[in-house]
Image (spheres, helix red, strand yellow):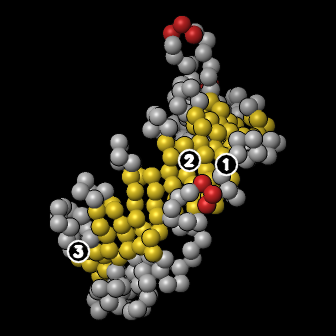
Amino acid sequence: MLLAAVDPNHDGSTADNQVTVYNYHDPYSPALATRIKYPDSVNAEWDAVTFTYALDGALAARTSQKKAVGDAATVIAFDYDDTFRRLVKQRVTQVGTGVDDAVLAIGYAFDTLGRRTTVTSYDDPTVELDHVLNQLQYTFNDLGLLAREYQEHVGPVDDETTLYVEYAYDDTDDTPADGVYDKGMRPKSVQYPDTARTVYTLYTDSKASDPWEESGIGDAISRVTALASAASRGNEWWRSSWPRG
């Protein structure tokens, strides 16, 4: 398949058309692209991106373009879990010529509910704990909403020392017996590692005399009207300009 950008510089000539070529040579599925040759490619064989796939159509490996004949191409392998076929690892099995080799693998972990809990960078494709470069970790509240997002720049996350962003939700519930949160657990605030900085999400207008807000529609439909430094509004970092109809 060809995808062409016709006359990209708008000079009236089609001599400079940019053509991307897609090849579909997978032995099991004709819908899977196995090679992409970009417009700036100088060779159809080694200056192209190639792909291989598992029987279920999941991407198994990606080989990058080479800069010149004789160079090595970067090859990335993709690993999946056996139960749900979720992506759990991306491993560099060959480092291309001139390519930074600091990060050689990225791993993904999930909890029993299928939620992604960590994203980890490794300096070795074997994905061993003692090769962790940095890590993100996510925790959730009882309703499955993101509660904390940890980010450790050196090594794995330590729950006691790693800085995190904390998310809060509006759990207003005037009638607990009905089993429904009045505000639908909508986002309420974001607490950054610097405890002096919390961003509050507001749903009511700052102008009490605003006839549009007198109807309470912003609060009723959970439409964000401002991001502020306090639940009582404080400094507004952003304020909506919704049409007043």
Depicted 67 relative to depicted 216: above or below: below
Gap in angstroms between the C-alphas marked 2 and 1: 9 Å
Number of disc labels: 3
Where residue 64 appears, x then y in whole percent?
40, 76
Depicted 13 relative to depicted 111: above or below: below
The residue lying at 43 percent from left, 84 percent from top is 72
Q: Is residue 84 left or right of residue 33?
A: right
The residue lying at 49 percent from left, 84 percent from top is 97
Gap in angstroms between the C-alphas marked 1 and 3: 42 Å
Where residue 146 appears, x then y in whole percent?
58, 37
**Circle 2 SS class:** strand
**Among numbered discs 1 and 3, the one appearing first in the sequence:** 3
**Among numbered discs 3 and 2, the one appearing first in the sequence:** 3
Q: Amino acid at mark 3?
A: Asn
**Residue 1 appearing in the image:** yes
Q: Are marks 2 and 1 in contact (CB under 8 Å)?
A: yes
Q: Which mark is residue 23?
A: 3
Badge 1 is on which residue? 157
The residue lying at 62 percent from left, 26 percent from top is 170
Q: Amino acid at mark 2?
A: Thr
Badge 2 is on which residue? 118
Q: Are marks 1 and 3 in contact (CB under 8 Å)?
A: no
**Residue 212 appearing in the image:** no
Depicted 205 relative to depicted 88: above or below: above
